[in-house]
Each structure stands twice: as structure tokens, then as C-alpha cells.
Image: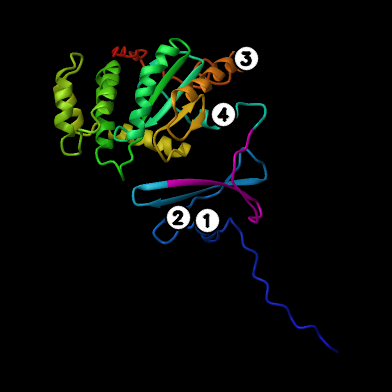
Amino acid sequence: MCLAPAGPAQDPKKSALDKATLEAYVRHLYVMDSRVSVQVLDPKPSTELPGFLDVKVRASAGAQSQDFDFLVSRDGSKILQGSIYDVNSNPFKADLDRLKTEFSPSFGTPGASVVLVAFSDFECPYCKEEASMLRQNLLNAYPTQVRLYFKEFPLESIHPWAKAAAMAGRCVFRQSPAAFWSYHDWAFAHQAEITAENFKSKLAEWAKSEKDLDAVQLTRCVETKATEAEVDRTVAQGKELGVNSTPTLYINGRKIAQAIDWPNLRSIIDYEIEYQKTAKNAGEDCGCDVKLNVPGLQEQKALPLEKK
């Protein structure tokens, strides 16, 4: 009896639920060599897509890191990556739920139908340009319809004094929410002159001119790094949202992951103002933002812009 020659041995079926298998797959997918550390976190049942599991893969190199979110079939054979939308809710609901604005510097109108959240770095030149654009235009064009929140996101691996500036900003904010915006404008305006070595002396010079600040208290706050945990929490929140560059701006949950010019930003805001008149599923008047009931905490008011 003649037998057909045996074919090549079949490799055993692989499963993306095996952490080593998924790590190797992701390394190949994104060309991550041994210089990049890859961690596969434990799978969780997907709340968005029944029958699949949510698996987060964290890649890091030095101080830089990025998370990748995957959906894996329960048998481990298929991997999905992409956005899932529920036609019955705001397409940006997932990020709206994760954006926490309490105790963040803000200007604009409480209860506004359009909320902007800016993740920014005081040493980033693109952040400087966007910050100037926002401060010069936002309230002039939208005196009642918009509110902006500022979130510190210092890129420590490339900007040596960014975290010190972020912590100092939080120290200023602790004393005077209005003075924070004076500090914000000063830090960006003097970005080219500031270094890691002279930051504290420059800050002390600025503080002397601020009548609403106690310079001694500010120095003590900076020296003891009293606000470092606050900045770290904001950075962690940004990473959870997938922020990995600055500036990153959210407009009613819509993510803009690069600098945007005023005409394009204005067109998005105008659209959202009209859309929210009937949708009412974003902004501060939709119930999306949970406020903490803390005695003595008052609404933050914007520092008026100086007319040039």
C-alpha cells in the first residue's frame, strides 16, 4: 500500500491570552526591539463588546511609556484594535467619563455647553503657541459658552524643568486660582529664558510682583515638592486617556492630539454649541462632570487678559 508523504508538522495553535505570545506579536506588529520593555496586563471582560476581553499592553523605554488597548476573543485566536461606538450615546463618552476636572485651574463660564481640557507642558514650544491662542481668543469669542481646564502633563524625558514648573503652578493655584493664570502666561512668555538651573530664581522674581501671593509660602511649597503628587495624578490620568504628546486638547471629549489653529478650533466649538442645544450629552451642563462638595471651595474665576 502506498502512503502519501506526511506533510509538515502543524504548529500548535497560539493564543493571544498567553502573555508571552501576545508580547511577541505586539513586538513584531510595532517593531519593538529589546530596548523597549513590554508588559501585558491581565485580561478583563469587555464592557463594550460582549464575548471579548480587554487586554492592555504597556510599552516603555526609560521615562516614556505608551499603552495599547486590544480586544481579544475568548478563544484567544483573534485580536481587535480600534474604536467601538454605541449609537445611543456620545461617541466620545468613554473619554468624557475619564476626564476629571475637579480641582484643576480653569477659566470661562461654569455650566458652559462646551468644555475644553488642555494637557500641556510649560517647556513645550507648541504648547506655548496653543496657550497663547487660547488665552487671546477663547473668552473674547465665547464669553459665556465655553470653559477651559488646564492639566499639567510635563514630558520629563525631553524637558528638564517642565515638572518643576508644573508643580510650581499647582503651588500658585493652591494660594490663588486667579494668580495661576498670571503664572501660566508668565511661564510660557519666558519659556526661552528659563532653564532647569535658573527656574527657582526666575519664579521668585515673578512672585514678588504678584500682590495676591505670599512669596515665602510659595517658596516653601516649591522646596518641599508639596504638589508633586497632584502633578503625578494628572499625568497618570493623561496616560489612562492615551495622552502621549503635548499639546493634547479635548473638546467635549473629542481628542485633538496636536496643536490646532484658531480657525479650526473655532469651527469645532461652533459645531458643538449648536449640537449641544439638542443633544445635551457633553459640556458641564450634561451631568458628565462630577463636582466634589468641599466646604469653602469656590468657583475659580479667570484672570482678565491684558490688552496688548
Circle 4 packing at 10 Å, graded few (<14), some (14-19), many (20+), is some
Residue placed at 46% from the left, 16% from the top?
146
Q: Which residue matches tag 4?
A: 93
Quadrant for the N terminus in the image: bottom right
User: Residue 298 location in percent, x, y?
Assistant: 35, 12
- Specify the amino acid type for callout 2: Val
Out of 145 and 178, give the one closest to the viewer.
145
Q: Which residue matches tag 3?
A: 278
Q: Which residue matches tag 2?
A: 38
- Specify the amino acid type for callout 1: Val
From mark 1 to mark 3, how far is it between C-alphas?
A: 42 Å
Residue located farthest toward the top when viewing the structure as drawn:
144
Q: Are marks 2 and 1 in contact (CB under 8 Å)?
A: yes
Out of 80 and 131, give the one closest to the viewer.
131
User: Residue 64 location in percent, x, y?
Assistant: 37, 47
From mark 4 to mark 2, how far is it between C-alphas?
A: 29 Å
Badge 1 marks a residue whose secondary structure is: helix
Q: Earlier along the polypeptide chain: callout 4 or callout 3? A: 4
**Range of magenta residues:** 66-85
Badge 3 marks a residue whose secondary structure is: loop
Circle 1 packing at 10 Å, graded few (<14), some (14-19), many (20+), is some
Q: Are marks 1 and 4 in contact (CB under 8 Å)?
A: no
